[in-house]
Amino acid sequence: MNDEMEEIISEFITEAEESLDRIEPLFVELEQKGEDKELLNDIFRSMHTIKGAAGFLGFQPIVDVAHTSENIMKKLREGEISISKKIMDVILKSVDMLKLLLAHLKNKDGIEENVAPLVKELESALNNAISVSGGIGEAAQKADPVGTAAQEIRSSETAEQLTAAIVQTSEEPKPRPDITVAADSAMQESEEKVQASLPEDQKLKEAAQKPKDTAHNLRVDIERIDKVMDLAGEVVLVRNRLLNISNYFDQKYSNDSQTETLMETVSFLDRVTSDLQLAVMKIRMQPIKKVLSKFPRLVRDMSASVNKDVELIIYGEGTEVDKSVIEHIGDPLTHIMRNSLDHGLEPTEERLAKGKPAKGKIIINIFQKGNQIVIEISDDGKGMDVENLKRKAVEKGLLTEEEANKMSDDAATEIIFMPGFSTKEVATELSGRGVGMDVVKTNISLLNGYVEISTEKNVGTTFRICIPLTLAIIQALMVEVSGCKYAIPLSPIEETLKISKKEINNITGQNVIVIRDKICPLFELNSLLGNRYNGHEENESDHKYIVVIALGDKRFCIAVDKLLGQEEVVIKTLDGIDTTSSNVLGATITGDGKVVFILDVTGMSRNLLGSGKG
Amino acid sequence: MADLSIKVLVVDDFSTMRRIVKNLLRQIGYSNIDEAEDGAQAFSKLKNGGYGFVVSDWNMPNMDGLELIKAVRSDPELKGLPILMVTAEAEKEKVITAIQAGVNNYIVKPFTGEVLKEKMDKIIERLQAQQ
């Protein structure tokens, strides 16, 4: 029973958190749209359900907070009070409190929050709203926000004690379920009111027509899914080996009928494995909406504190991304939005003076492009002042005068990602929080992705984040250097070239080649990996193979001995190796059964070119 | 006597609540339990037949408990099905709406297994007496 109870509690926490995440943006929508019955119903229902389940589990503070805010929602729904900023603020506060209470439960930290002041605040907000609306006397009395049942069980602390208390309280409502009671005319009146507010027939029809998309869901522990993911990865590796072996047989025994059968079987296995891999990947995918749901609220609160009028528009919130993306993308997005609000968008007067609409816009656009998820955050603000960025970076000692002068405009925009950089003399409440935009870069590269900035004066700035679709299995280019095989992730590879050694120039100690009139730094893979023996193969041929890597606006070339072809590799992380400085992402087992390192080109780019000095 | 082998349908949009109610039902001896997320899903399950009792929440998306009761009561095959409404709203006006719509009884959240048993037994007794 104890385990069962624990499971129920953890399920409750997850479910309640999801409900709150879901309704939070609805509040902001409600504030914009005014009294929308559907929205009010939706929010009311969630509060109500959380309260109900919390009651069973004996989480009294949650019951109290949910109950009082539910009361407000009810009065709003019934039109007895109207939406005001004050009401919204206090309800949003209660959502925060519920989240905090749930977090305490989740962490089992035993911390108790005193919810009494908040409940009081909710009550007085409700009472004020009622007296404003004019329905004073009777309505105010009815609005006893903490129900009698709730009060009686307040003292009980554990679920067990609670159940004992319930026996009496639940028997309290006396009206016997009997049709005759309904003859009471006053009751009929109120019933008609309810009827009028809900056109039942119409709703019923709508409900019947609405396709059910959430009919059969199963909650599964993430560890189990990761285990399946892991095994699917192993299957991919075995498939790759089999493909290799069967090719060998095909060449050697092509006349044997069994070889043909083997080839057929392996090619079937190949297809099924790809499908399996995709299917497993999809289990881990969730709509990015989950992360975005907090932004309308965030923009609302932030725009109020910086006194700017801002509209947030989100496209593609249904785009599905890997769970790890959901986990890591929240902070970078928040920081970019804060930056746009704080530095990007102009104050209202300035906008009007420029002939722009008073209301600023932030647009988040999410879409899938090939094997990548692209997230664009655009504002229609003043754009980045590149010279100003450079000047500040020099003042702060992040760049030398010389570096700043040499820096291209594109590269200069990336200054804002430098640790310790902030463009305002006085850090504002929003941006000045110790952690800055550098968190954006760090988190995105954790996901093997990259960020680009494009900006235009007085038109606005766009941050473009690109992240690979899945993190565990990637397409890779297999290369060889000094007899060793390495895998380079395919997505950042722009092209591969065969060049003559004469094409390599040396500028101030750095090897470069010219690709279509653009100078591109060239690095030997051996030296990148710290291998010391580059003596014997140097003179073997006049040619070199070059892999051109493009990450955002940064480009560099890696020189290798041979290009071996494309292969699907499963990333296995290496325990005990510092992957940040070793230029290695992980390892994989190839079709021929060898362990091969996967190169970390994002890390290389960071180590070789530095940030903001591309 | 209540027949414990009947199939009971638990309707609630919050899965934690469905689980709590299912647990309580098991506690009091029912073992044949199915669940639905909202009125619409419940109604289509009920239409497939085989259910002997419905324990439904009131507030749900798509089709709420009240709409479910109305749909069941106006369906010639299902109209006699006993329905217990789970509600946190003890306000009289709402309960009466539900009774008028044809709910057999209601139970106020939170409740214990004993109270649930008592309510269900009463409904079943009354229905048996009518027959």
Image (cartoon, coloured by chain):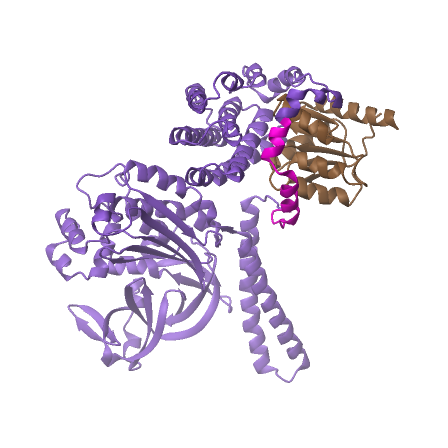
Chain colours: A purple, B brown
Q: Is residue A428 visible?
A: yes
Q: Is residue A84 above or below residue A257?
A: above
Q: Is residue A533 above or below residue A390?
A: below
Query: Residue A21 at x, y = what percent?
Result: 47, 39
The residue nearer to you, when weighing B64 against A268, is B64
Q: Quadrant of residue A462?
A: bottom left
Rendered residue at 28%/76% (across/down): A538
Q: Is residue A354 magenta?
A: no
Residue that sits furthest to the left in the current view: A401
Q: Main secondary structure of the magenta part?
A: helix
Location of the C terminus of chain A (image quadrant): bottom left
Rendered residue at 37%/47% (across/down): A312
The residue nearer to you, when weighing A250 against A353, is A353
Q: Is residue A214 magenta?
A: yes
The boundaries of the magenta stretch are A191-216
Q: Is residue B29 left or right of residue A293?
A: right
Q: Is residue B108 visible?
A: no
Query: Residue B101 at x, y = what percent?
Result: 71, 31
Q: Quadrant of residue B26?
A: top right
